[in-house]
Each structure stands twice: as structure tokens, then as C-alpha cells.
Image: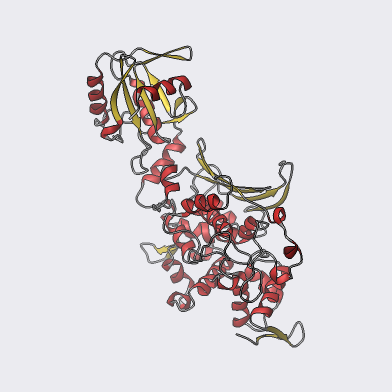
Amino acid sequence: MLKENDIKLLLAKSETDAVEFKLAKGGVPASFWESYSAFSNTDGGVIILGVKEDEGKHSVVGVTNANKLVADVWNAANNPQRVSANVLFNHQVYNVDYQGKALVVVEVPRAERTERPVYVGRDVFRGTFRRNGEGDYHCSKEAVEAMIRDKCPETADTCLMEDMTIADLNQESIARYRLMFAQSKPEHAWTRIPDDEFMVKIGAARKDAKGVVRPMLAGLICFGDFVTISNVLPNYFLDYREGVADGSRWTDRVAAHDATWSGNIIDFYFRIYDKVTSSVKVPFRLDERGLRINETKVHKALRELLANALIHADYHGRQGIVIEKRFRRLMFRNPGCLRMSKEAAIGGGRSDARNSRIFNIFALINIGERSGTGLSDIYSIWKEYGYEEPTITETYQPDQTTVTVQVELEEEAATPQETTATPQETIAAPQETIATPQETTVTPQETTDAPQENALGTTDLVLALINEKPEISLVEIAEKLGISRDGVKYHIDRLKQSVGLIHDGPTKKGRWIVTNP
């Protein structure tokens, strides 16, 4: 509860995003409920009744009957004709004596997503407000609809695409995903079923009333191509940008619309996940085989942030997903606000995915944190490494969530041993490994899991293709995995070291042999 000195400090700061003063001379003013709605739908705030505003300055005049005013607030909060939901707890409405004058304080919490939108009166589109700067504003129809989507028990990605079949999806994307699933769960019964049944099992599709298997929105976003997806979601967009510190140019970019790849979120993740972590500092450590260990908890956390941006995005929103990498900074921005308060998200322990089916599709290949500790772990890891605390920002009109993190670059702390490392000891090449939720986490001074223990590494996928077709060419491997020939050669060199891979016969007609399985 606020004390007299707390109110004195708030008066000195005047109104902010989280504080609103009102006169309340004739009882609870009508504008009180606009602020109540605005705070409930944004990030909470405090309304203090009994303060007069005059040309930007505030003076305490008090209220005539504080107890009655408190009762009036409760009566109206419980009246659905006045406001759609009562989000208040008993300890959040009380009166305070300030220099001999009575004030009434109402601490409005951020409403749970199942209660939003909190609106005044009976019209949700006319009575929904949010907080911006020092005032309340009417929410747009788009913002209200986004809150209604989040309120529904069924997540938006379960919507059935009634005019599509599995054939309308990108078949190469499905094949790549199935390969990764098989690598992750080689004995699973789903590895041997047809594609349409597999898509139903993983939650990407379901049968309609006539028994036809059709993709759900989750299946379209994960396995469609850009044109097909954008026909359903006009504002769908994925953009990875890498540039110099001053922002004058991009040195690397991967965008969903460039027509050189599918444009779906699964392929996007694997195209950029090593770009996100490349050049992040790796302390010089060797594993038991004498090879350099190229993973830290920071690498895993950055890939978790990437997965979160894709899993928790509001794909019906007006903006797309943007991942931006600059010197010592990484920014992850996705459409849609947090589905819980920042404090709850950072505190961990609650998992509330905006897209439950997409979440499941990623989780089946060991991507994405199921326990709700993702952001909590990231804050802990950044503190442990002595990095600047990550920032989470929610912005509105359009609704967006942005997470920005500081990273320490490899070149900032290079050692003589690192500069003379062999090719097998250097930092991971693009598409090298994917950290899984089961991966062992350690302190910065300890070594991390050896690369070969990551179940879904691209090196493992290359080996799986070779085992399936020993005569496969480098070009075929590159096409199936969506990587460059140089990238394939890198993983072939790793397999020569780890499993004794050799190529028997001429370049174009020979076959691969594993000499040390």
C-alpha cells in the first residue's frame, strides 16, 4: 500500500504511463473507468483520486467521503453494465491520509489474457482503452481483435485451412522436418507413417467433416511457402538483418519473400540460427578428443529467443517478425504483446504459447522451452556472464514485443590458442548444431556438451542422408538440407574425423563408407 511519502514522490513526477491523478469531487468520475480499462489492458498502474490538475501541475484537494468512494469503486467494478471485468483485489483499493487530506488509491493490475479486453460499458470496440505516455486512448479494432484472439481457449493456429490439402504445402519442407524428427526419435512409430497421417499426429493438420486431411494454420505457417501463407495472412513476413553498428547498411539478410527458399518459419529457423550465434564469444576449451568445444549457454539462449519469436508471434498482426543483429546487440521483434506481465514472463514457471500447435511442432524436434523458464533462464545467464540485462519492450498500434540482448563477440577476446586452432577446433560453421532442451548447462568456466551430443546437428543429418543413400552427391545433400556446398564439405570433414568417413571410387560414381561407426 502506498504511504504519504510514496504519494509525495508520485506527485513530484506527475502523471506517467503508470500513474493517473483525478479530482473526484462529485464521486467516482466517468474518466476513472477509461483509465481502469487502459491500465488493465496495458501493464497496470495507479489511479489516485482527490488530486486536481491545473496546467500540468497537480495539487492535493482530497475527497469528502473516502470510505463511500471506496465502496462506489467496488460496486461499479462488479457491475457488468459499467465495466466488463473486475480485476481488482481487496488490498488494491484503499484510502490514504496525505497532509491531513483523504485520498483514495486504486492499484489496477495488468489483466490476465482471459479477462482482456477490459472495456467500459457494453460495446467492446468503443469501450476498450490502453495507456500511452500520459493518457488513455481508444484501442483500434485490430488491437481489440488481437486481445479477443488471445482470450480464446483454442489458439489461433488451430484454424483449419478448408480450401487446402497437404499437397498445397512445401513438400521439401515436410521431408526435411521428417528427417530431423527421425534423427531426434529414430525408433518412433511416426517415422514410418505416410505424410498426411504424420502431419495429423504432429498437430499440423486434421481431418475435416468429410475425412479429408487439411492443414491447420500451424501447418501452413510451418510448412507452406511464402505466397500460399501470405494469401491467408497478408502481413506475414520474416526478416533477418545483419549489419554494421552505425546502421548504414546490411551485410547479410534473409527474407521470406526473396523466392530462393520456402519462406516458412521452420526453414527460416534453420537458415538463420547459426547466423544469430556466429561470432559469439566461446572460451577456449577442448573436449576429451582434443577438439574445441564451440557451444556455451549463451548460444542456447539466443536460439531459444529465436524460437520464441516464431512460436509466440501473432501472425494475424500488422507487422512481421524481424531479427536484427548488429555489433554486440541482437534484437528479436515479433507481432503481438506478451500474454502475461513482464514480471511473470521473466519469473518463469508459466508456459502460455500464443500458438500451441506451432509450439508442439518445434518441440517435437527439441526446439523451444516447454517449462516456461525460457526468459527466466536468459536473464539468469546474462547476469552470470556479466552482460547488460536484456530488455523487453511492448509497443502498441501495432502490437509488438521486442527483446534486445547484449552479446560479447569472439574477436574481442581472442587468445593465441584460438588464432592457431585447426579447422576442426574453430567455432561452429553455419548450420552446425542445434541446442536441445535436454542439453547440459554449465557455468562460463566449465565446458559445454560436446558437439556430437546434439541430436539434431546438421552433421548428423548429413550422416543420415549418407546412410540412407551411400552414393549421394554433395550437390544432393546441399539441396536436401538447404545449405551450401561449402557447408556440406565442412560437415563431411567433421564426419571424416568422427566416424572415419571415406569416399570410395570416382567423384561422380563412387560411394561413401563409414569405417568407424
Report the residue at 72% width, 55% height from top. 411
What color scheme is it? secondary structure
Viewed as shown, does residue 374 lie left or right of 430? left
Image point (48%, 63%), residue name: 437
Q: Is residue 334 above or below residue 67?
A: below
- 12 lies above or below 342: above
Q: Is residue 248 above or below residue 222?
A: above
Residue 176: x and y, percent?
57, 69
Residue found at x 42% / y 45%: 339
- Residue 205 position in % (x across, y down): 44, 63
Q: Quadrant of the N terminus?
A: top left
Res 89 → quadrant: top left
**Nearer to me, 50 or 265:** 50
x and y percent of residue 246 in the render? 72, 41
Tell me if residue 56 can be seen: yes
Q: Is residue 231 visible?
A: no
- Whether 218 is drawn above or below 320: the answer is below
| Residue 446 located left or right of residue 345 | right
**In this figure, what is the number of numbered marks?**
0
Quadrant occupied by the C terminus? bottom right
Image spot of residue 146 (x, y percent): 44, 42
Q: Quadrant of residue 78?
A: top left
Q: Nearer the viewer, residue 499 or 210?
A: 499
